[in-house]
């Protein structure tokens, strides 16, 4: 039922002139989902207070509650269309009254870890793009069909939302920006093995996939006490996200997974000088897939000892600095990091090997990130002791990966199993740091069992992939033109 509801919502948005892409569909359904969730949360808390004989103070004033403006009910529990706003009245209420009211919560909140602050932050970053008030009414009616009452319902909704993020990740060739494959994230979580009480940080959290998977892992591990649950909710997950759309979607994704007030801040992580990071600012675990290919301004580069325009390399410096001594990290980065010969890359590899134990490098094949042709590796390291030996694993699922046959958990099962003991195999091998060139710190080591070296793709491979992507884009545009005729 929920899946059909999501499809119906997208079908209505497709008809609206203000929503032109999968990105718009995800953003617009996100703020509406958030308000519906908030209504369910308030309803549950009010019932809980009544049972305990307490008075409950609502977060939202009555005119701005979902049950008042969006879905007032009749005596039979059905939407009372005699009382609902629709058309221009509905659109104008949302744009001129509801959004300004919700934006004001940021100033009124007692702190950034409150649901009130998140309300203000979310509605300060987005706007309603649905132009037709009649389309709005239809979408709201569909949203109201969704239920957040049971864990099963929340679980189903979170899976559907993940699918939506995945679709959005494939739109506009930005898969690496919005969507890290969940099997890869789960493999990172299994290698790092977070524990209750440890803090987990992602300074480029996007849709919060690492946090959501780590939350599921920690919840399923052992019988949790009430104190453990509070720790998970309030004192475990921390993150930052620069882009408004990704921030909104990340917060909503965490909420659907069960984290009511995510500690995610909307900011550019790289604008902070890493020299200012103190012990109180550090975390036990860092899991992240920082954006690759970005170029940062000179004033941002000034915040880092190794200056480079490559966004991912600045993030790696930030992650090393923000880890506690003994802290663990799993970072996705372009595979060219292993072999680039520019001064910044060499200096960064030297810093990583000398200040951290880079114990594992997972080499991912092309096609791991749908919609992004860049080949990547995952660096696993612990801070505080220099690297003595690096264990490499060359992931080879035995097929060309793409939209129809993406990465799955079975593909990574051998890696997780062998990594526990750093075992050698046809796909895995170890290299002593003493055998790495001390001038270049080049880590693009060839598989001694006959596999390819972990290194750059050839220009021919890159051009072929660009041509395939262009052909796919032309096909999509052709289909759209046919629909518009």
Image: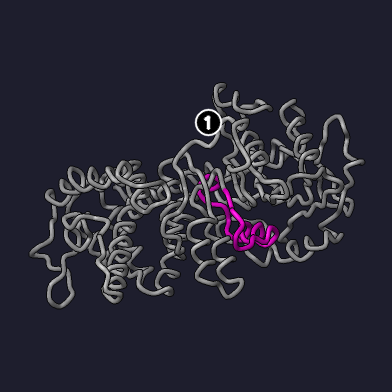
Give residue 211's position: percent from left, percent from top: 54, 56
Instruction: Report x, y in % for residue 55.
Output: 24, 66
Q: Residue 9: x percent and y percent?
A: 31, 60
478 left or right, relative to 270: left
The residue beneath circle 1 is 271
Q: Nearer the viewer, residue 372 or 195?
A: 195
The answer to whether one can see residue 481 in this image is: no
Q: Residue furthest right?
A: 434
Residue in front for this viewpoint, 22 or 211: 211
Residue shown at 41% from the left, 69% from the top = 154
Dot 1 alpha-carbon crowd within 10 angstroms: few under 14, some 14 to 19, many 20 or more = some
Q: Residue furthest front?
A: 53
Magenta-span inclusion, residue 181: yes
Estimate the x, y position of residue 87 in percent, counting from the top left.
13, 52
The residue stretch that appears in magenta: 175-201
Which residue lies at the image location 12% right of the left edge and 76% below the top edge? 75
Q: Nearer the viewer, residue 294 or 326?
A: 326
Towards the viewer: 159 or 38: 38
Location of residue 347 by image quarter: top right
Q: Residue furthest top?
A: 298
Q: Is residue 151 left or right of residue 435?
A: left
Residue 226, above or below 164: below
**Up-down relation of residue 435 to residue 132 (above or below):** above
Q: Quadrant of the N terminus?
A: bottom left
């Amino acid at each position: 039922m929920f899946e059909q509801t999501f499809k119906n919502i997208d079908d209505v948005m497709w008809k609206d002139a203000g929503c032109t892409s999968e990105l718009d569909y995800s953003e617009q359904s996100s703020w509406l989902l958030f308000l519906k969730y908030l209504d369910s949360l308030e309803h549950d808390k009010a019932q809980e207070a009544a049972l305990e004989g307490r008075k409950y103070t609502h977060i939202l004033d009555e005119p701005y509650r979902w049950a008042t403006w969006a879905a007032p009910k009749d005596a039979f529990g059905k939407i009372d269309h005699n009382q609902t706003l629709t058309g221009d009245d509905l659109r104008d209420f949302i744009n001129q009254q509801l959004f300004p009211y919700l934006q004001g919560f940021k100033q009124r909140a007692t702190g950034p870890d409150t649901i009130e602050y998140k309300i203000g932050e979310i509605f300060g970053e987005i706007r309603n793009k649905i132009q037709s008030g009649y389309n709005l009414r239809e979408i709201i009616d569909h949203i109201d069909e969704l239920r957040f009452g049971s864990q099963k319902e929340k679980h189903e909704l979170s899976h559907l939302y993940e699918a939506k993020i995945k679709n959005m990740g494939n739109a506009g060739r930005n898969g690496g920006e919005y969507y890290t494959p969940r099997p890869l994230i789960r493999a990172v979580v299994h290698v790092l093995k977070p524990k209750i009480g440890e803090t987990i940080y992602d300074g480029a959290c996007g849709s919060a996939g690492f946090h959501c998977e780590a939350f599921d892992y920690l919840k399923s591990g052992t019988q949790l006490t009430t104190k453990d649950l509070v720790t998970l909710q309030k004192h475990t997950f921390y993150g930052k996200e620069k882009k408004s759309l990704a921030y909104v979607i990340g917060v909503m994704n965490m909420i659907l997974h069960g984290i009511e007030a995510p500690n995610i801040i909307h900011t550019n992580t790289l604008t902070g000088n890493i020299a200012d990071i103190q012990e109180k600012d550090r975390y036990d675990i860092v899991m992240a897939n920082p954006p690759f290919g970005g170029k940062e301004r000179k004033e941002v580069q000034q915040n880092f000892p190794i200056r480079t325009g490559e966004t991912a390399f600045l993030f790696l410096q930030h992650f090393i600095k923000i880890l506690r001594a003994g802290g663990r990290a799993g970072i996705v980065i372009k595979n060219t990091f292993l072999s680039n010969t520019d001064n910044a890359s060499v200096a960064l590899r030297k810093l990583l090997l000398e200040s951290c134990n880079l114990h594992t490098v997972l080499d991912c094949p092309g096609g791991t990130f749908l919609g992004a042709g860049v080949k990547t590796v995952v660096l696993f390291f612990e801070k505080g002791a220099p690297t003595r030996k690096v264990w490499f694993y060359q992931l080879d699922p035995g097929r060309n990966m793409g939209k129809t046959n993406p990465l799955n958990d079975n593909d990574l099962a051998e890696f997780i199993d062998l990594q526990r003991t750093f075992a050698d195999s046809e796909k895995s091998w170890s290299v002593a740091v003493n055998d790495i060139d001390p001038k270049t710190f080049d880590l693009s080591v060839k598989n001694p069992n006959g596999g390819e070296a972990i290194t750059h793709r050839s220009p021919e491979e890159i051009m072929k992939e660009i041509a395939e992507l262009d052909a796919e884009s032309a096909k999509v545009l052709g289909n759209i033109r046919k629909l518009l005729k």
